[in-house]
Amino acid sequence: MARNRRNAESSRSAATLSEGSRVTPTLEKSLTGINGFDEITKGGVPQGRPTIVCGGPGCGKTMFALEFLVRGAMQYDEPGVLMTFEETTAEMTKNVASLGFDLKELEARKKLFSVDGDADGLAEVLRLWLARHQRFGSALYLAGESYGTTRGAAIADKLHAMGVSLQGMILVSCAMDLQSLVFVHGNDLPYALFLPAFANAAQFHGRLSGPLAASPQAAREAAEAFVNEEYLAALHAGARLASGRVSVVLKPKE
């Protein structure tokens, strides 16, 4: 198996790197294939658990994740899924072409999947299963949670194009409108939608005072009223907001 091969090589690499420094590896690692990173980390990323790559804009988070997927596909015969919230598949393909990565070729070989490729693949698996077991007449439902709601909507569309009808969908914690989730310049919606939850968190941790600190309900209702009456209008006004109004909006409420 590709993963076993990657892990086996990682264990040998970590052991070799440890011999000179007298450090006994205590955490199983998976090689990334990224030049220099596996040496620095003594074997790559932790095996069998999620790895979060954090950093400011332009620090290389996307490139790091993408190279991990590409190296996995090219060196370890390991497929991967790439999901982006801002850049399209075409933009990503163009951005990494200068590094010698051909994402179209990897996707054609089914070694790398974009969001559309992911939906295409899963829809085809469902169609084949229904055909093999002669279940096209059965009631068919899809369920998804969080990003799975986005995925479910895409799969439903693909199935519909294949002539496969759904009887219904179950969507939990919908994340189909990414405009409500992604904090980027020019998108005011999440700033308004998240504020009541931030107010609740502040109340819980004792960061509010006066009536707002009385209860979670008081904090939430005050935040919702502020959003509806002042904050959202101020966000929409942007640079057109009068300087006097800026100070009023920013003034702490008791």
Image (cartoon, grey):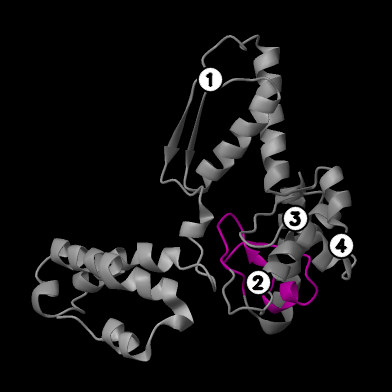
**Quadrant (top left, top right, bottom left, bottom right) of the N terminus:** top right
Give the alpha-carbon distance from disc 3 to disc 4, as whole Å. Answer: 13 Å
Which range is magenta? 24-52
Expressed as whole percent of the image width and height from the top left, the position of residue 167 reads 50, 20
Does 202 sit left or right of 117 as displayed?
A: left
Q: Secondary structure at mark 2?
A: helix
Report the amino acid beneath label 1. Leu
First in sequence: mark 3 or mark 4?
Answer: 3
Q: Position of residue 171 (x, y in %)?
A: 44, 37
Q: Which residue is mark 1?
A: 140
- Contact between marks 2 and 4 (CB within 8 A): the answer is no
Disc 4 and disc 1: Cα gap in Å? Answer: 39 Å
Who comes first in sequence, dot 3 or dot 1? 3
Q: Residue at x 14, y 73 (%)?
A: 212
Label 3, label 1: how far apart the Cα atoms are: 30 Å
Sequence-first disc among 2 and 1: 2
From this viewpoint, is residue 238 visible?
yes
Which residue in the structure is indicated by mark 2? Answer: 61
Q: Residue at x 72, y 35 (%)?
A: 121
Disc 3 to disc 2, C-alpha distance: 16 Å
46 in magenta: yes
Of 14 and 22, which appears nearest the observer?
Answer: 14
Mark sitting on residue 122: none
**Magenta: predominant secondary structure element?**
loop
Q: How many marks?
A: 4
Question: Circle 3 is placed at which residue position?
Answer: 89
